[in-house]
Amino acid sequence: MSKIKDSLYGFIIGDALGVPVEFISREELIKYPVTSMLGYGTHVVEEGVWSNDTSMTLATIDSIINCNGLN
């Protein structure tokens, strides 16, 4: 179970790091890498905000838990 939780935390943190720089070119990110939580980039949101990808992943995991697995 720990590996699943650790994977989810990594996904959520990665998503929050990526939201402000979504759609920025690879070249720009190589010049100015993301090294901390940012806010107000491509999307006008505060630092640490995750995207709909995390919301959908958490909803899916919640459903799997509440339905006692996949049927």
Image (cartoon, helix red, strand yellow):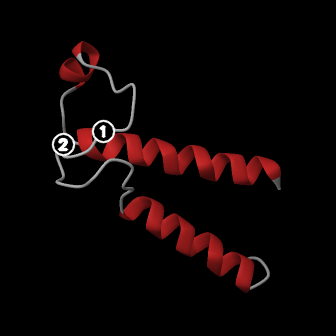
Q: Residue at x 17, y 54 (%)?
A: 44
Q: Do the numbered discs 1 and 2 sit on residues whose CB atoms are within 8 Å? A: yes
Q: Secondary structure at mark 2?
A: loop
Assign the N terminus to one quadrant of the image. Answer: bottom right
Q: Residue at x 36, y 55 (%)?
A: 49
On screen, residue 48 versus residue 40, left or right, reads right
The amino acid type of the residue labelled 1 equals Leu
* Amino acid residing under circle 2: Gly
Q: Position of residue 70 (x, y in %)?
A: 73, 77
Between 55 and 26, the one nearer to me in the picture: 55
Mark 2, residue position: 41
Please identify the quarter of the rendering in which residue 34 is found.
top left
Q: Residue at x 50, y 45 (%)?
A: 13
**Which x, y percent locates residue 17?**
39, 40
Question: Circle 1 — which element?
Answer: loop
Q: 5 above or below 67?
A: above
Residue that label 1 marks: 38
Residue 52 vs residue 45, the one in the foreground = 45
Does residue 24 lie above or below 52 as drawn? above
- Quarter holding the C terminus is bottom right
